[in-house]
Amino acid sequence: MPKRILSGTVTSNANAQTVTVSVERRFKHPVLAKTIRKSKKYRAHDENNQFNVGDTVRIQECAPKSKTKRWEVLERV
């Protein structure tokens, strides 16, 4: 099965080798037909602590690295 790849903005890099990435998705409400924005935060593995708050990055699914980390950072966009 292919691994999911998402794009989002780094919101925190306080922990060692971990960044928090906020991913926003947009969709049309089925009844109201207005565009809705929803966001979700993912904790991603950042091996060299190279990403800072505000960076736009791509993250990819991976095997669990810790209790909360299931993603790893691929690259800066």
Image (spheres, rainbow, N blue to C red):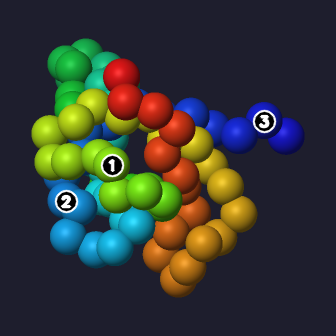
Nearer mark to the viewer, of 2 and 3: 2
Question: In the rendered view of the protein, which quadrant contains the N terminus?
Answer: top right
Q: Nearer the viewer, residue 32 or 16?
A: 16
Q: Crowdedness of circle 1 by 10 Å Cα count: few (<14), some, many (20+)?
A: few
* Residue 16 position within the rendered picture, expressed as x and y whole percent measured from the top left: 34, 73
Q: Nearer the viewer, residue 40 or 53?
A: 53
Q: Crowdedness of circle 2 by 10 Å Cα count: few (<14), some, many (20+)?
A: some
> Label 1, on which residue?
50
Q: Is residue 17 above or below residue 48?
A: below
Q: Nearer the viewer, residue 55 or 1?
A: 55
Q: Quadrant of residue 38?
A: top left
- Residue found at x 55% / y 79%: 66
Question: In the rendered view of the protein, which quadrant contains the C terminus?
Answer: top left
Q: Alpha carbon of mark 1 to alpha carbon of mark 2: how far?
A: 12 Å
> Label 3, on which residue?
2
- Residue found at x 48% / y 45%: 73
Q: Earlier in the sequence, mark 1 or mark 3?
A: 3
Q: Alpha carbon of mark 2 to alpha carbon of mark 3: how far?
A: 27 Å
Nearer mark to the viewer, of 1 and 2: 1
> Label 2, on which residue?
12
Q: Secondary structure at mark 1?
A: loop
The answer to whether any part of residue 31 appears in the image is: no
Q: Is residue 26 above or below residue 66?
A: above
Q: Secondary structure at mark 3?
A: loop
